[in-house]
Image: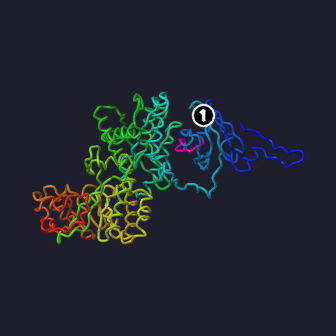
Amino acid sequence: MNFVFRSQRMSSGPLLLSPLDLITASGHVGYRWDLRSDSLLWCGDWQALFGSMIPSPPVTAKELAAIVLPNDLHLLFDDTAPSFDREYRLRGPDGTLIWVHEHGTTDYENGHALFQQGLLRPISSSDQQEGSTYTSPDRDPLTGRPNRSCLIDLIDKVLKGPREIRNASAYIVVGIDKLAFVNEAMGTKAGDMLLCAVADRLNELCPTRALVGRAAGDMFGILLPSQASELPALVKRILTSFHDHAIRTTETSLHLSVCIGSLLFAPKEDGDAAEFLINAEQALFEAREKGRGHYMNYVESEERGEQNRAVLEIGEYVKQALKDQTLRLAFQPVVNTQTGAIEFYEVLARLIDKNGALMPACDFIPVVEQLGLAPDFDRYVLNHSIQELAACDTLRLAVNVSGLTAALPDWPSYVQSQLASRPAIARRLIIEITENAAVLDIAKIRCLVDSLRQMGSQVALDDFGAGSTSIRHLRDLSLAIMKIDKDLLTNILESPEQQHLVRMITSMAHGLGLRIVAEGIETEDVALWLRRENVDMLQGYLLGRPSLDRPWLEAPSDEAESSL
């Protein structure tokens, strides 16, 4: 249905354009949506907007939802702000995407939204190239779907909404099994295409108004507002579909298995959105422990509740520390085995807990990654490390970067923006990446390594021996330093097998042009053995504990050299 306005001419004056003429001339289409009766009225040339997608304009939310890209639905149906400005995509029957820009307002009565009205216009190719990556902060840059922070916001809206909706809602998380091996076998480009295809399939399998987002690297979250009754059937459809049908892209076809964890919003009367994600992911992890293609629903227990509350509490400490700039940096020396001189310091983050005590990284870094805080956390540590390098022109620092951050498409450009104009600082910076992170997304890590090397920085592979890095990985990544996982050095003086393994790792690294660091050194006997085996550098309590002070500002000490 359209509003109809007619042009009028004053008896002795110019033609007066009606509102319809003005809207049409501006290239917009207007609408008014009665939220109580769920009826839509349109004003203007709706055919110019929808084209051949539909024979008549949508008159209900369900009809409009049918032509909106599924992962953009939340932009329309979860936004009742007094005024709004948003972009989303319409999908034609042939798969063609049309970007739409909309601005409008919401009318309220006694705190309840009654009407929305707005103006829409298609966005030209100069505004938004079809198929380009949508880089909104609430979107995953690869799939264009809601990211983790957006999922948390949407879950929060359900939690704070009417009880009847909350109690009838559910959330599930779908994890792709062995994605790292897919990337290793087929390359990251093929892996990315498969991820997008997985997201599309999940959309096809989900009921109308369900929302699919990317919760983490190999995990997709699905929010089912007022659709908890659909949960059993949806889980069955997903598991059956992935078991019976290969995922197809333009370049490959591959059978992928998935595991699923789920969480019902009822009977909880309150809760934190981040906690809901953690609970569902806990169920997913338990399903994965059973093997491929399994499903677990989260069941609350006292022990689980305590664990999750501890995770959220630590998460709040981290967010507040980042906001207040109170996250502390500690520095531990890495010493040349032959000379005893300090080659560089590793930067280690320390968090202050509610009692004022320092919390070691091993107690909060897993939480940082689990809650999706790694990018902000790593930027903080990198930026403060750069400040330290700028203040002392003889200092060298090694900074750890989460694998989740290192694999982000925009991370190399971010690092470059911080270092490109400061080559003297870049040459004194080492970025450490864990072995497991390097294996998970080898192509993206290679992009980061290449970018850092061009600026003069070095990259170290941390915890070597804890993952499954191949010699080809080491060669292709063009690393500078390899740090042996400290577990390989446990009881090394009593274990001929471990001694042989360390000798092989050292010989291989030197053959590839890498320098070796042995971590976790606490006794002089182990330090002397590693020196005889030509390990290049040592790190551990024997050589120096992490210090919140700036050790390079203190008077030189012969302590490290005498220990060797």
- Name the residue at 31% across, 48% down: 366
Q: Give the class, few, some or many, for how many residues have Cα within 10 Å of label 1's Cα (few <14, many ≥20).
A: some
Q: Quadrant of residue 269?
A: top left
Look at the picture and state if 266 lies above or below 86.
Answer: above
Q: Quadrant of the N terminus?
A: top right
Q: Secondary structure at mark 1?
A: strand
Instruction: Please provide percent x and percent y for residue 377.
Output: 37, 53
Q: Which residue is mark 1?
A: 108
Q: Is residue 223 visible?
A: yes
The reply, left or right, for residue 548 in relation to residue 280 is left
In the rendered structure, does residue 555 fall within the stretch colored magenta?
Answer: no
Q: Nearer the viewer, residue 505 or 14?
A: 14
Amino acid type at circle 1 is: Tyr
As drawn, the residue found furthest toward the right would be 12
Q: Quadrant of residue 62?
A: top right
Please give the count of numbered marks on the rendered protein: 1
